[in-house]
Image (cartoon, rainbow, N blue to C red):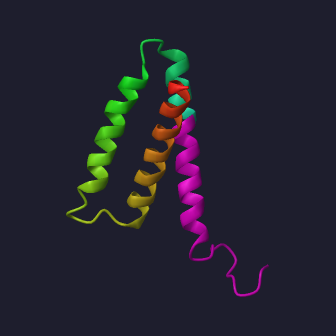
Amino acid sequence: MAKGKIRGFMGSADWQETTYTDTYQKEIRGLRRRLASDPSCTAEDLEGILKSLYIMDGSDWQGRGEVQSINLAAAIAAYEEIIGELRK
Protein backbone atom coordinates (compact mmCIF):
# COMPACT_ATOMS: atom_id res chain seq x y z
CA MET A 1 0.00 0.00 0.00
CA ALA A 2 1.31 3.44 -0.93
CA LYS A 3 2.46 5.57 1.94
CA GLY A 4 -0.20 8.01 3.09
CA LYS A 5 -3.10 6.20 1.40
CA ILE A 6 -5.89 4.46 3.22
CA ARG A 7 -6.84 1.13 1.72
CA GLY A 8 -9.96 1.44 -0.40
CA PHE A 9 -9.68 5.20 -0.79
CA MET A 10 -8.12 7.06 -3.68
CA GLY A 11 -6.09 10.21 -3.31
CA SER A 12 -7.96 13.49 -3.63
CA ALA A 13 -7.20 13.93 -7.34
CA ASP A 14 -7.29 10.23 -8.24
CA TRP A 15 -11.05 9.89 -7.96
CA GLN A 16 -11.58 12.95 -10.15
CA GLU A 17 -9.34 11.61 -12.90
CA THR A 18 -10.91 8.16 -12.65
CA THR A 19 -14.43 9.61 -12.81
CA TYR A 20 -13.55 11.73 -15.85
CA THR A 21 -11.84 8.85 -17.68
CA ASP A 22 -14.64 6.37 -16.95
CA THR A 23 -17.35 8.79 -18.08
CA TYR A 24 -15.41 9.80 -21.19
CA GLN A 25 -14.86 6.18 -22.22
CA LYS A 26 -18.51 5.27 -21.61
CA GLU A 27 -19.67 8.23 -23.71
CA ILE A 28 -17.27 7.34 -26.53
CA ARG A 29 -18.47 3.71 -26.54
CA GLY A 30 -22.10 4.81 -26.47
CA LEU A 31 -21.65 7.27 -29.32
CA ARG A 32 -19.80 4.72 -31.45
CA ARG A 33 -22.55 2.16 -30.81
CA ARG A 34 -25.18 4.71 -31.77
CA LEU A 35 -23.39 5.60 -34.99
CA ALA A 36 -22.95 1.91 -35.88
CA SER A 37 -26.58 1.02 -35.20
CA ASP A 38 -28.28 4.17 -36.51
CA PRO A 39 -27.15 5.15 -40.01
CA SER A 40 -29.36 8.23 -39.88
CA CYS A 41 -27.32 9.71 -37.00
CA THR A 42 -25.13 12.51 -38.33
CA ALA A 43 -22.51 14.90 -37.03
CA GLU A 44 -25.22 17.57 -37.09
CA ASP A 45 -27.37 15.46 -34.75
CA LEU A 46 -24.48 15.10 -32.34
CA GLU A 47 -23.70 18.82 -32.61
CA GLY A 48 -27.25 19.57 -31.48
CA ILE A 49 -26.72 17.45 -28.38
CA LEU A 50 -23.31 19.04 -27.83
CA LYS A 51 -24.91 22.51 -27.93
CA SER A 52 -27.31 21.36 -25.21
CA LEU A 53 -24.38 20.10 -23.15
CA TYR A 54 -22.66 23.48 -23.53
CA ILE A 55 -25.84 25.18 -22.30
CA MET A 56 -26.03 22.83 -19.33
CA ASP A 57 -22.37 23.54 -18.57
CA GLY A 58 -23.03 27.28 -18.51
CA SER A 59 -26.22 26.98 -16.48
CA ASP A 60 -24.76 26.05 -13.12
CA TRP A 61 -26.80 28.57 -11.19
CA GLN A 62 -27.88 26.00 -8.58
CA GLY A 63 -24.48 24.35 -8.27
CA ARG A 64 -24.34 20.85 -9.66
CA GLY A 65 -21.45 19.61 -7.57
CA GLU A 66 -18.03 18.39 -8.51
CA VAL A 67 -19.02 14.92 -9.71
CA GLN A 68 -21.66 16.24 -12.10
CA SER A 69 -19.26 18.89 -13.36
CA ILE A 70 -16.64 16.23 -14.08
CA ASN A 71 -19.21 14.00 -15.82
CA LEU A 72 -20.44 16.90 -17.94
CA ALA A 73 -16.89 17.90 -18.94
CA ALA A 74 -16.13 14.31 -19.95
CA ALA A 75 -19.35 14.05 -21.99
CA ILE A 76 -18.55 17.31 -23.79
CA ALA A 77 -15.04 16.09 -24.60
CA ALA A 78 -16.40 12.79 -25.93
CA TYR A 79 -18.93 14.50 -28.20
CA GLU A 80 -16.25 16.88 -29.47
CA GLU A 81 -13.95 13.93 -30.20
CA ILE A 82 -16.55 11.91 -32.11
CA ILE A 83 -17.78 14.94 -34.07
CA GLY A 84 -14.17 15.70 -34.98
CA GLU A 85 -13.73 12.13 -36.24
CA LEU A 86 -16.89 12.41 -38.33
CA ARG A 87 -15.76 15.70 -39.84
CA LYS A 88 -12.42 14.30 -41.08
* Image: 38 above or below 48: above
The N terminus lies in quadrant? bottom right
| Marker count (numbered) | 0
Quarter of the rendering occupied by the C terminus: top right
User: The magenta stretch spans which residues?
Assistant: 1-28
Q: Position of residue 35 (x, y in %)?
A: 51, 21
Instruction: Look at the picture and state if 28 lies above or below 5.
Output: above
Residue farthest to the right?
1
Q: Is residue 3 left or right of residue 81?
A: right
Q: In the rendered structure, does residue 36 fall within the stretch colored magenta?
A: no
Q: Nearer the viewer, residue 35 or 26?
A: 35
| Above/below status of 50 relative to 2 | above
* Image quadrant assignment for residue 49: top left
In the rendered structure, does residue 4 fall within the stretch colored magenta? yes
- For this view, does 33 lie left or right of residue 41? right
Residue 70 falls left or right of residue 61: right
Residue at 30% over, 62% down: 64
Instruction: Name the residue: 20% across, 63% down.
Output: 61
Furthest residue toward top: 39
Residue beneath the point at 36% across and 38% down: 50
Residue in front for this viewpoint, 82 or 64 = 82
Residue at 45% x, 45% y is 75
Residue 60 horizontal side relative to residue 24, left or right: left
